[in-house]
Amino acid sequence: MFPAAAAVKKGARVEVMRTQVAIVGAGPAGLVLAHLLSRTGIDCVVLEARSQQYVEQRVRAGVLEHPTVQLLCDTGVGRRLQEEGLSHRGIRLRFDGADHLLDFVALIGRSITVYGQQEVVKDLIEARLAAGGPVFFEVGGVRLSGLDTDEPEVAFTGGDGVERILRAEVVAGCDGFHGVCRPSVPTRHLQVFEREYPFAWLGILAKAAPVQPEVTYAYSDRGFALASMRSTEISRLYLQVGPDEALDAWPDDRIWEELNARLALDAGFALNEGPVLERGVTTMRSFVVEPMRYGRLFLAGDAAHIVPPTGAKGMNLAVADVAVLAEALERFFATGATDLLDGYSERCLRRVWRAEHFSWWMTSMLHLTPGADAFERRLQLAQLRYVTSSQAAAKSLAENYSGLPYGS
Ligand code: APR
Ligand code: PHB
């Protein structure tokens, strides 16, 4: 137990705690932030609405950019990632009945790593608990107050039913798109930028060995499909579906048939099929809020921005935000200087908007827009042929996909 995080007043009804940074949310953003802060001796408390088991099992995306891998390895939470993660030289774009490898290592000297987000979360929770850092799981009724003062507070009910107040110097809003932190900011202080897409992804996790050696994005007349993996035994596969698609409409046979049809190659292709372990539908949205700060509240990850999953950027952006925030907080707590905290939002938003553009661009290039005419389809094909034949265009895709440096 960190001394500064210990309860300072135990009343009959409310327990008051103190910390330097209150972190709301134990997804990648909250957990990486807690990890980076504790390495520099900054005290923090993490509050998470779900159970530990739930956050460790929640199936999400699984491509780590080069800078994400570097950060996790450099800070001592990359052991399992290096042992079990699949290092890939690049990705494949499949169209016109053929595969086109974009070899990032040959193009720009950088690889990507396929490693499930929930595995990253497990590694970070293990590190946090081993360091004795508090994580309160299954909290309820989280309320933020005093955000425009130097003493913000987070009130919550613990999983044990005890009412608590966490007094902090800074609150990190890492509670995802549907969390409470962003809505705690008076709306006049935030500007929202948003796009919804007229399609969604149906994703499955299957006990079936992946056939394709790299993550493969397929453009077809039947709609987009993506063939990814989690290990040499587990496939992760996605199909473009309607925005309000009912899962009931997709029995296993139909899913496999449609995946095979969209992933077809002139030379022949068939997925290995196996039991479906998990399935779900993901809506597609681009969303950014500006600024990513209100007083002593700093928003990070999905709480501040969402990308459609086509560029595999969600988790990577969350990690990039908190890397910037951790550096700013370190300076603030060491010297009292607020310059880096004051620059946090602007510095993050430059990279966020680059990733927003890349994710929107990949999405627009690869999906079948309902009602799209032949003109739009020809433009998409022209773009696909360009990025797979021009070195300059391929390099641009490669550097965006494998991750631009932080602060760029
Ligand atoms: N109080 C406490 N915790 C909350 C609350 C709340 N009121 N509301 C939400 N949470 C928790 C969620 O249960 C979740 O565990 O906040 C966490 C937010 O984690 P993520 O949604 O994973 O968001 P983030 O850490 O920003 O990571 C972004 O995760 O959502 C994916 O695709 C996204 O890959 C991206 C990455
Ligand atoms: C995944 O493996 O889950 C995955 C891969 C690439 C994406 C999105 C998700 O663009």
Image (cartoon, rainbow, N blue to C red):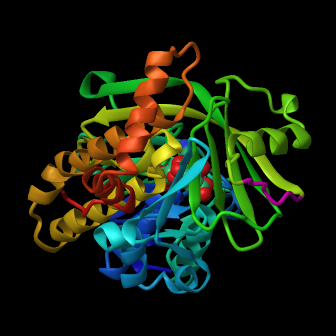
In the rendered image, the vertical position of residue 224 relative to residue 43, given as above or below: above
Q: Quadrant of residue 360?
A: top left
Q: Residue 203 location in percent, x, y?
A: 70, 45
In the rendered image, the vertical position of residue 49 relative to residue 105, given as above or below: above
In the rendered image, the vertical position of residue 369 relative to residue 175, given as above or below: above
Question: Magenta stretch mostly in which secondary structure?
Answer: loop
Q: Residue 214 location in percent, x, y?
A: 57, 64
Question: In this view of the protein, can residue 46 be seen by the observer?
Answer: no
Frontmost residue, 277 versus 154: 277
Q: Residue 180 location in percent, x, y?
A: 49, 38
Frontmost residue, 25 versus 218: 218
Q: In which quarter of the image is residue 320?
A: bottom left
Residue at 62% over, 52% down: 139
Residue at 41% over, 50% down: 301
Q: Is residue 333 magenta?
A: no
In the rendered image, the vertical position of residue 282 relative to residue 297, given as above or below: above
Frontmost residue, 396 versus 95: 95
Residue at 42% over, 73% down: 69
Question: In this view of the protein, can residue 249 be seen by the observer?
Answer: yes
Name the quadrant of the C terminus: bottom left
| Residue 264 placement, left or right of 288 | right
Residue at 35% over, 72% down: 106
Frontmost residue, 242 versus 263: 263
* Count of number-bearing discs: 0
Range drawn in magenta:
268-274
Q: Residue 364 location in percent, x, y?
A: 44, 31
Q: Does the magenta stretch include residue 273?
A: yes
| Residue 207 placement, left or right of 144 | right
